[in-house]
Amino acid sequence: MAASRALPGLLRRRLAARTQLGFHLSPRLLSSSAHEASKPAPSEASDHSYESLQVTSAGTHILHVQLNRPDKRNAMNRAFWREMVECFNKIARDPNCRAVVVSGAGKMFTAGIDLMDMASELLQPEGDDAARISWYLRDLIRRYQNTFTVIEKCPKPVIAAIHGGCIGGGVDLITACDIRYCAQDAFFQVKEVDIGLAADVGTLQRLPKVIGNQSLVNELAFTARKMMADEALSSGLVSRVFADKEAMLAAAFELAAEVSSKSPVAVQSTKVNLLYSRDHPVDQALDYVASWNMSMLQTQDIVKSVQAAMEKKDLKGVTFSKL
């Protein structure tokens, strides 16, 4: 009780200190602008024009990235591997974006790599001898790996919404995302062994950490068998399954809206630290988050969030600065 009585005074002192430091807070900043709320969401996201992708605004602070070659089952052609990097580098720097939904246009999420379009790069690599061909192929593979690593490194949470087939490179893509939803008709295939190669752009590295079952990962990777939606849910590959694509997308956008209503400093800091913790021992991860938060704890977002909680206000009514 004493602590709760002292908290308003602490907040007032914190607010006063921030005003002296240049953070000018007012009741107007603690509620969403009516003018902003009345603006219609634009259909096309500015500064995003691609051959293989379509990027649209799906609400305040939310972008929808669609794999957009439905006539080719969203197969990943040369343009795709290049454009995904460009797209997510822009999103990472976009101060208005706080959450991203990735889906596939048409009847399925993706059929994986476009072998017809990529054949010359993969089967006729440049180079005068084995050493030079190897250098070329290693550089090519590293560039393709970055197509999905850029999703993981993007500080904005990325939600994958999967319907129909998610084959080969599709599994590489979704395992680099933060949250995965799927429709009941979804299936997943680590398809690479069926075309004579080991998956090399992320699945073998991320899938074991996503589902935590090495035996199942080995089975899927050695056989290229289909994993259906219910098995994907029970294994932890996806967190929710929906009746159809429409219900899944509606839920994904609702989740993105919920995430985007929170402090972007808090959410993006959480993503950075979750990824660091995944790849480092606990003691190193604790030291990392201590160093991280020694600066992030100074954000005005804490004051705004705590004040909203004390006043029993929804965070959706709090205006956080761009990040």
Image: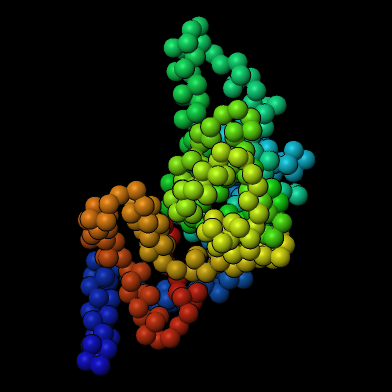
Given residues 312 and 250, the one toward you in this image is: 250
**In this rendering, would 275 be left or right of 8?**
right
Foreground pick, 6 / 190: 190
Residue 56 showing in the rendered view: no
- Judged from this view, the residue extending furthest toward the right is 71
Image point 45% across, 54% down: which residue?
212
Image quarter of the N terminus: bottom left
The answer to whether residue 196 of the structure is visible from this angle is yes
Query: Residue 208: x, y in percent?
Result: 46, 48
Whole-percent x, y for residue 292 in the image: 27, 56
Coloring scheme used: rainbow
237 or 274: nearer the eye? 237
- The quarter of the rendered structure image containing the C terminus is bottom left
On the image, the x and y values in percent for residue 287 come to 22, 56
Q: At x 41% / y 62%, what residue is drawn?
A: 267
Residue reaching furthest to the top: 128
| Residue for point 62% across, 71% down | 38
What is the x, y in percent for residue 302?
Answer: 33, 71
172 relative position to 212: left or right:
right
The tally of labels here is: 0
Quadrant for residue 119, please give it: top right
> In the image, what residue occupies the spot 58% across and 71% down?
37
- Establish if 320 lies above or below 307: above
